[in-house]
Image: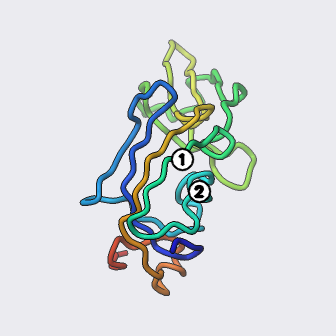
Amino acid sequence: MIKKDAVVSMSYNLKNSDGEELGSTDANKPLTFLHGAGQIVPGLEKALEGLAVGDKKDVTIGPKDGYGEFNPELKLKVERKQFPADTEIKPGMQFKANTGGEHDHTFQVMEVEDDHVKIDGNHPLAGQTLYFNVEIVSIREATKDELAHGHAHGPDGSHGH
């Protein structure tokens, strides 16, 4: 049964409200994570609690319990000179910046103008309702190393780092 500190492997299919597939895995290459460590969106983690191997579940997750609400204040236009002069800035690039919080924030370059760059700090799925179809492939107890490192080391617990 899925509970905190269990290593879970699952296959999933993720779609948006338009029915467009956003991601998937299958039982041969499942997603493996340490349950309760915040490695998947909170709404999905909560919905998986108590499931067993072989269980299938459809889960709908609103923005609040997914990738957050879209925040227009995270769409910015900054001066090109704020980037290192020798860096080629292109749309799609991602970078981290300290916004005054505890952790750095990831931004994506949306558009490059002559002396300005438009960036967006929202997750690409922010503001979207997510539709997951999941199947639990395996569940096992986490190893001491996995608990110490705060993440799963693969389906069998082995990991080189």
Residue on which disc 1 sits:
59
Amino acid marked by disc 1: Val
In three-dimensional space, the C-alpha distance between marks 1 and 2, rounded to whole angstroms, equals: 7 Å
Residue located 54% across and 81% down the image: 148
Identify which residue, 31 or 101, lies in the foreground.
31
Q: Position of residue 26 (x, y in %)?
A: 29, 53
Image quadrant in which you'd find residue 75: top right
Element under disc 2: helix
- Quick one: 117 or 152, which is closer to the camera? 152
Using the image, tell me which numbered label, if any, was put on residue 47. Answer: 2
Q: Who comes first in sequence, dot 1 or dot 2? A: 2
Crowding near the residue tagged with mark 1, few <14, some 14–19, many ≥20 C-alpha atoms within 10 Å: some
Residue 144 spot, x, y in % from top left: 49, 87
**Amino acid type of the residue that numbered disc 2 sits on in the rendered structure:** Ala
| Helix, strand or loop at mark 1 | strand
Residue 153 rendering spot, x and y as whole percentages: 39, 73
Q: Residues within 10 Å of mark 2 (few under 14, many from 20)?
A: some
Pick the front one: 145 or 129: 129
Residues at circles 1 and 2 in contact by the CB criterion of under 8 Å? yes
- Residue at (53% x, 80% y) in the render: 147
Q: Look at the picture and state if 4 lies above or below 126.
A: below
Tell me which corner region of the image, top left, top right, bottom left or bottom right, holds residue 68. top right
